Amino acid sequence: MEKRKFGRTGYEITALGFGGMELQYLDETSAVRLLNEALDQGINYVDTSPEYAMSEYYIGKAIAGRRHEYVLATKCGDNMTGRGPKYSFDKETIMSNIDESLRLMKTDHVDILQLHGVIPADFPYGKWEETMEVLEEIRRQGKALHLGLTVCNKGPGMYGFPAGYGYHSILPFAKDPRIEVIQLVYGGLTRLSENVIKEASDRYGTGIVARGILKRYDDSYPAKLACAKLTDLCEDGENENDFLVRYAVSHPGLTCVLAGTKNIDHLKRNVVMAGRGRLPKEVYEEAKRRLTFAGVVPGPVEMAWQDAVR
């Protein structure tokens, strides 16, 4: 599988990464098998969070002994007390998160530490600098080597769901040089951030990770897919999901797309598709034309850029 330069981090990671959210739904035996299979398949980027129950524990249990084989990313700002808001970006919460993550995953550092599910409005009145100082302290301690964030997608029926927050947030966050990695919702079915992803990558050198590349976020997606007729563009033996994996890895500004699955067969299939590499240019452009015709359109980079610098 192709490895790509991961922004300014100095790493090269596989075009397909492993997302650890689904691990929380597995028993230990199944989780250990799945994680080792991901590495055996050549994946070298593993992303998780304290919020994903048992995920960090399983990573420590299954692949701590293979730590040199993968770039490890986790998140912080997860309020694990069961009291108060779901996310809290105060020093106590962030420090507690990283220390517990390292303990569970049996490592002395994570490669990427990400603020979890944020937008610029989460940090009013100087809170951004306060939060970044905490992250910088963790980096100085050697517990995290690089810093980033994931942009929230909220829930169905809420403003901005699922990709609006990423579209409006990526450039304001990317202009801070301390933020080297940004993860957001993007895929063939959620193209809103298609142009701003490239802008962030080209202008700031940010490493961009996409999640939700196959997810049908609302009931309109099947009709849009039917209208786009992407199956007409598939190579022999490929299906619609296969094509969407290749569509996502074809984006010139993306470093990595996450495959979150609890099914080994699905994992292997996604690895095969990512391993086929980017779509031929003419197929990629035709897919974009068809998706736009079906109503799945990217947002104009000019609008988001104006918002970012305003």
Image: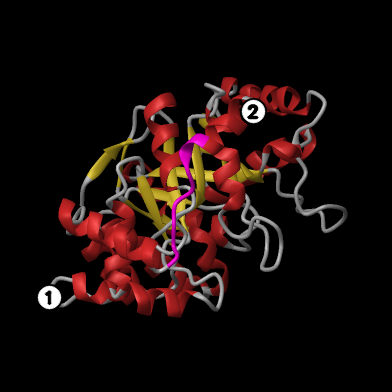
Mark 2 or mark 1: name the one nearer the start of the chain: 2
Residue ranking furthest to the right? 84
Task: Using the image as rendered, state which of residue 177 and residue 92 is in the foreground.
Answer: 177
Q: Position of residue 259 (x, y in %)?
A: 40, 61
The answer to whether 292 is drawn above or below residue 238 in the figure is above
**Residue type (three-letter) at the residue carrying disc 2:** Leu
Confirm whether the magenta stretch covers residue 141.
no
Please report the bounds of the magenta region as a residue range.
295-302
Q: Do tag 2 and tag 1 residues touch (Cβ < 8 Å)?
A: no
- Is any part of residue 114 visible from this angle? no
Element under disc 2: helix
Q: Position of residue 33 (x, y in %)?
A: 38, 69
Residue ranking furthest to the front? 293
Q: Main secondary structure of the magenta part?
A: loop
Residue ranking furthest to the left? 236
| Residue beneath disc 2 | 135
Q: Residue at x 71, y 62 (%)?
A: 158
**Residue type (three-letter) at the residue carrying disc 1:** Asp
Task: Using the image as rendered, state which of residue 203 and residue 76 is in the foreground.
Answer: 203
Q: Position of residue 126 (x, y in %)?
A: 79, 23
Q: Residues within 10 Å of mark 2 (few under 14, many from 20)?
A: many
- Is any part of residue 112 visible from this angle? yes
| Residue beneath disc 1 | 236
State which quadrant residue 247 falls in.
Answer: bottom left
Q: Position of residue 3 (x, y in %)?
A: 24, 43
State which quadrant residue 207 falls in.
Answer: top left
